[in-house]
Image (cartoon, rainbow, N blue to C red):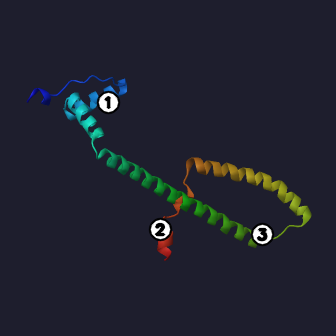
Amino acid sequence: MTASMKKRKVSVYLDPDVMRSLADYAVRREQSQSMIAEAAIASFLSPDDAERREALIVKRLDQLDRRMTRMERDVGIAVESLAVFIRFWLSTTPALPEPAAQAARAEAGKRYERFVAALGRRLAHGPKLRQEISEDVGESQA
């Protein structure tokens, strides 16, 4: 090698955590820290680095899109469940005469508190409704 083709020494300052990661990686790969640092710098400076970063961003966006799709599905299930329940309740519950309605309102407060407590337990410990409903319900009915 000529003098201009020799490798040159570079001094850099690394955060202790980064240095520890570099040392651990070098031991696991049985390679020198210098070689790993050189490869990392070359990779960072290479023209395809932008393409790799774009691929990572696209992958992350795809993950977010799948999560949003699941959220839309879950909200749809919740809205439909509420609509079915309200329609059923309205069609099966007769209006009460006033003296009975007052007693029912008093009991309703107690029942609502029990409902909220039960809902809290279910949300904390599961199972969730979305786990009980198959994602392919629509496909199996088609």
- In the image, is 99 to the left or to the right of 9? right
Indicate the quadrant where residue 11 lies. Answer: top left
Where does residue 120 sit, x and y in percent of width and height?
64, 48
- In the image, is 46 to the left or to the right of 116? left
Where does residue 52 sit, x and y in percent of width and height?
32, 47
Circle 2 packing at 10 Å, graded few (<14), some (14-19), many (20+), is few
Q: Which residue is mark 3?
A: 93
Q: Residue furthest left?
A: 1
- In the image, is 39 to the left or to the right of 115? left
The residue mark sitting in front, 3 or 1, is 1
Q: Which residue is mark 1?
A: 21
Q: Is residue 85 above or below residue 128?
A: below
Q: Which residue is mark 2?
A: 136
Secondary-structure class at tag 2: loop
Where does residue 34 sit, x and y in percent of width and height?
22, 28
Q: Residue furthest right?
A: 99
The amino acid pointed to by label 1 is Ser
Secondary-structure class at tag 1: helix
The amino acid pointed to by label 2 is Asp
> How far apart, in angstroms, are the residues tagged by discs 1 and 2?
44 Å
Q: How many marks?
A: 3
Q: Residue furthest bottom?
A: 142
| N-terminal-most mark, 1 or 2 | 1
Secondary-structure class at tag 3: loop
Number of the label disc, if any, that sits on residue 32: none
Write the residue at 34% across / 46% down: 50
> How far apart, in angstroms, are the residues tagged by discs 3 and 1?
66 Å
| N-terminal-most mark, 3 or 1 | 1
The amino acid pointed to by label 3 is Thr
Write the residue at 27% across / 42% down: 46
Q: Is residue 123 above or below residue 19?
A: below
